[in-house]
Amino acid sequence: MTFNRITVVGAGTMGNGIAHVFAQYGFNVTLCDPNQAQLDLALETISKNLDRQLQKGKLTQESKAASLNNIEISTQPKLIFPHSDMIIEAVPENMSIKREVFEQIGKYKSKHCLVASNTSSLSITALGAMTQTPEQFIGMHFMNPVPVMPLVEVIVGHRTAQKTVDAVVALSQKINKKPFIVNDYPGFVANRIALPMINEAIEALELGVGGVLEIDQIMKLGMGHPMGPLQLADFIGLDVCLAILEILHKELGKDKYAPSILLRKMVLAQHLGRKSGIGFYDYQSDIKNPTIAPQFT
């Protein structure tokens, strides 16, 4: 299948990262979001991230300019969806928000268009049923930051056609990602394993088994993790961690997935990690070199 136009719905962190990567590898990309200010911010973020790649010698000034030239923005999905060959949804992890997006996609997309969700935990089978063409629906779970992380977790729904799987695997390889195919179960593979680890680290902190620094350094130095589980939680967003754990707990019905009380309290307090400036670490003075949050010192 030929992909002449990739549309990414949602101009947040994941959406702008996905658009960035496709544009960098020569695809025509439309970044679609109802919020014009969010679109403007996304373009600014993409430009800054391309500058970082430029400074590291990973691309040239010409390729940066070409990448930006490959991206269009729009607040009008009904004008964009009919001309898309692939639509990738990257809106917040909320079923009602996603339902609205997929109902629009089902209404306006062309017959040949493939549709993917960047969901990190919701059922691909359930989401695909909202599009009217579930055989053309699949999960593409990119990792954050998208321009850096090589993995794409490709999730196959109950009605996903094999030709859709083959096309998406090939497409992922064209943007220099490593696709791995998994089946549609809550949390898939990445979050089914990672989120209980994060939750256990939060519970260990809550019980006083170790401090923030000790827990993260033990996992980094002893287990070879590039980032400790508490710092990783801050990076993902504690609200996102909570949402995924709640889905795992509800769908799988096992206590090991029940979110810790401390995690719930921090989300209620809007201490969400990097996005809010404070979580287990304090990012308000220096986001690249955070200190331990005052309540955990």
Image (tube, helix red, strand yellow):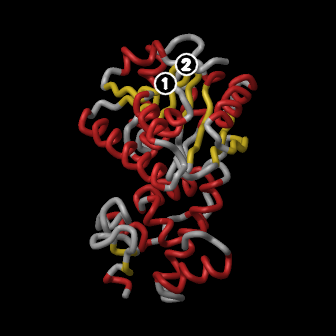
On the picture, is 219 further left or further right than 240? Answer: right
User: Could you tell me which residue is drawn at 59 percent across and 65 percent down?
Assistant: 196
User: Could you tell me which residue is drawn at 38 percent across and 65 percent down?
Assistant: 273
Please determine whether, in this image, residue 19 is positioned above or below residue 287. above
Along the viewing direction, whichever of 2 and 91 lies nearer the viewer: 2
Residue 100 visible to an observer of this rendering: no
Q: Mark 1 and mark 2 in contact (Cβ < 8 Å)? A: yes
Along the viewing direction, whichever of 91 and 224 lies nearer the viewer: 224
Along the viewing direction, whichever of 291 and 255 lies nearer the viewer: 291
Splitting the image into 4 quarters, where does residue 198 fall? bottom right
Q: Give the spatial CA distance, label 2 vs label 1.
A: 6 Å
Q: Residue furthest left?
A: 37
Please determine whether, in this image, residue 11 is positioned above or below residue 239. above
Q: Position of residue 209 (x, y in %)?
A: 53, 88
What is the three-letter code of the residue carrying label 2?
A: Asn
Decide: few, some or many residues near mark 2? Use Cα within 10 Å; few <14, some 14-19, many ≥20. few
Which quarter of the rendering shows the N terminus?
Answer: top right
Q: Which mark is residue 4?
A: 2
Q: Which mark is residue 28?
A: 1
User: Could you tell me which residue is drawn at 54 percent across and 75 percent down?
Assistant: 201
Please determine whether, in this image, residue 262 is positioned above or below residue 107. below
On the picture, is 137 further left or further right than 130? Answer: right
Which quarter of the rendering shows the C terminus?
Answer: bottom left
What is the three-letter code of the residue carrying label 1?
A: Asn
Tag 1 secondary structure: strand
Number of dots carrying numbers: 2
Specify which label sits upstream in the sequence, 2 or 1. Answer: 2
